[in-house]
Amino acid sequence: MKNKELLNICYKFFNRFITTDKLLEELTNIDTSNLPKKDIEEQNKLIEEIQIIAQNTPNEIDEYVIQEKEKIKNLINRFENIPKDDKNLDFLNKQLENLKKDYGKEIDSHERWFKIKDYINKNSYFNKVFESLTDYELLEFIAQNISAPFPPNLNQEEFDRLVNIGIEKDEREWLWRLAFNYENRSINFDSIVEYFIKKKDGYYLAELISAVGECLNIDKIIDMIYDKELIEDLEDRKSAISHYVSEEQLNRLISKLD
């Protein structure tokens, strides 16, 4: 049985969605009842090594921690300055409570995070589990997050392989999420664009444009679209795509309705 939970937990740590303490807590609480004895032993070794690294790496306040604390502090100030009334009082108070909790939490220094991330990436058991994923499982794994800072390294051929399985299974939600995770990473998204156009899916085409529009050839996309219903759908979604589609480009698309 594949230890997908371990991958998901480590991936959250790689992307700084959780701290070292939470990483260790979640790894320790993985249900191992269906795992082979060898896997359990390898997982325990990984946890032990992470604990050693954490103990031997002082979690000092560095530039990254200062910047993250400052971001949270600025959000707190913004929420505190929003005028409160009966309609938003509960919501704003809840947001402030959560932000203040986040401000008080420990944040991993770059050194601690990097050392643990580097160890996990080189761990043979972690890599064995990761490499056991099928293309469909890898697509699902990546698509669980949107615009993750550190997605798995993929070249164009590997990316296209995931796109092909996503098209085969008609996983449109996963496909635009996949693209969003690889924005500005020298990856070509044409095959996803072409699929959404073929399916006349204005919703997901607009989602893709709004997410990675600066990585797309908008003029080329407009030239490819002739279906009346798709054009009308995109016209209705112009506010969602206006950041990357100019008024001139949109008018050129709409003119095809004449």
Image (spheres, rainbow, N blue to C red):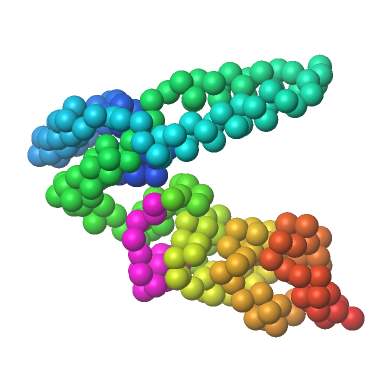
Residue that appears at 60% across and 67% down: 214
Q: Relative to 184, does residue 191 appear above or below in the rendering?
A: below
**Does residue 67 appear in this view?**
yes
Q: Decide whether residue 215 is among the magenta residues.
A: no
Q: Decide whether residue 156 is among the magenta residues.
A: yes
Region in magenta = 150-165
Q: Position of residue 109 (x, y in %)?
A: 33, 36
Indicate left or right for 219 with 190 as reference: right
Residue that appears at 31% across and 26% down: 21
Position of the C terminus, as image quadrant, is: bottom right
Q: Relative to 157, does residue 80 appear above or below in the rendering?
A: above
- Our reading of the magenta stretch's main secondary structure is helix
**Does residue 1 appear in this view?**
no
Q: Position of residue 69 (x, y in %)?
A: 48, 31
Residue that appears at 71% across and 17% down: 90
Q: Relative to 249, does residue 153 appear above or below in the rendering?
A: above
